[in-house]
Amino acid sequence: TLAQHVYNDPKIEDAKFDIKAWVCVSDHFHVLTVTRTILEAVTDKTDDSGNLEMVHKKLKGKLSGKKFLLVLDDVWNERREEWEAVRTPLSYGAPGSRILVTTRGEKVASNMRSKVHLLKQLEEDECWKVFANHAFKDGDHEFNDELKVIGRRIVEK
């Protein structure tokens, strides 16, 4: 959620990124698949290439000299050598390019050689506020007791 707010923040427009892309990585990690997914997010076109070198070449061509913001969301893979293979074409972006990685694993962040920001768990009252704001439209926080009980049980989890 925090990454989405950053990605969609109007101040990001002021940073003048040539390319913005969001890629959900998840737990099924394969270098070719992830690299091709990044290429597709950058180009808005499907790519059927089964050759990693070809995908790297295309991605390098699209990013070379361009300032980009890339969000790699929900990363689980901890194998550094695979990340190095994915990062190779990303290194050709212009200065000021940024890669934002969301993960639940601190080792993933260190493998990406990035600065780690650990987020603390929200207190229950803060969770309730977030939940209520998203669960009820138009800021209508007047709900019956039954809905409140159900909502509080969800927040506890």
Image (spheres, rainbow, N blue to C red):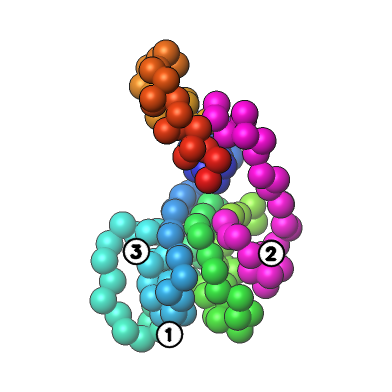
Q: Residue at x 55, y 74 (%)?
A: 77
Cα separation between marks 2 and 3: 27 Å
Q: Secondary structure at mark 2?
A: helix
Q: Residue at x 26, y 66 (%)?
A: 46
Mark 1 lies on residue:
53
Q: How far from the left and from the top, in percent, is residue 26? A: 45, 66
Label 1: few (<14), some (14–19) or many (≥20) C-alpha neighbours in 10 Å: few
Q: Is residue 84 visible?
A: no
What is the number of callouts on the image? Answer: 3
Q: Secondary structure at mark 3?
A: helix
Q: How far from the left and from the top, in percent, is residue 44? A: 31, 57
Q: Amino acid at mark 1?
A: Glu
Horizontally, residue 115 falls left or right of residue 84, namely right
Which is nearer the eye, 40 or 109?
Answer: 109
Label 3: few (<14), some (14–19) or many (≥20) C-alpha neighbours in 10 Å: some
Cα separation between marks 1 and 2: 29 Å
Closest to the camera, between mark 1 and mark 2, is 2
Give yes or no for residue 114 being in the magenta stretch.
yes
Mark 3 lies on residue:
40
Mark 2 lies on residue:
106
Closest to the camera, between mark 2 and mark 3, is 2
Answer with mark 1 or mark 3, whichever residue precedes in sequence.
3
Cα separation between marks 1 and 3: 15 Å
Q: Amino acid at mark 2?
A: Glu
Q: Residue at x 49, y 37 (%)?
A: 153
Q: Amino acid at mark 3?
A: Glu
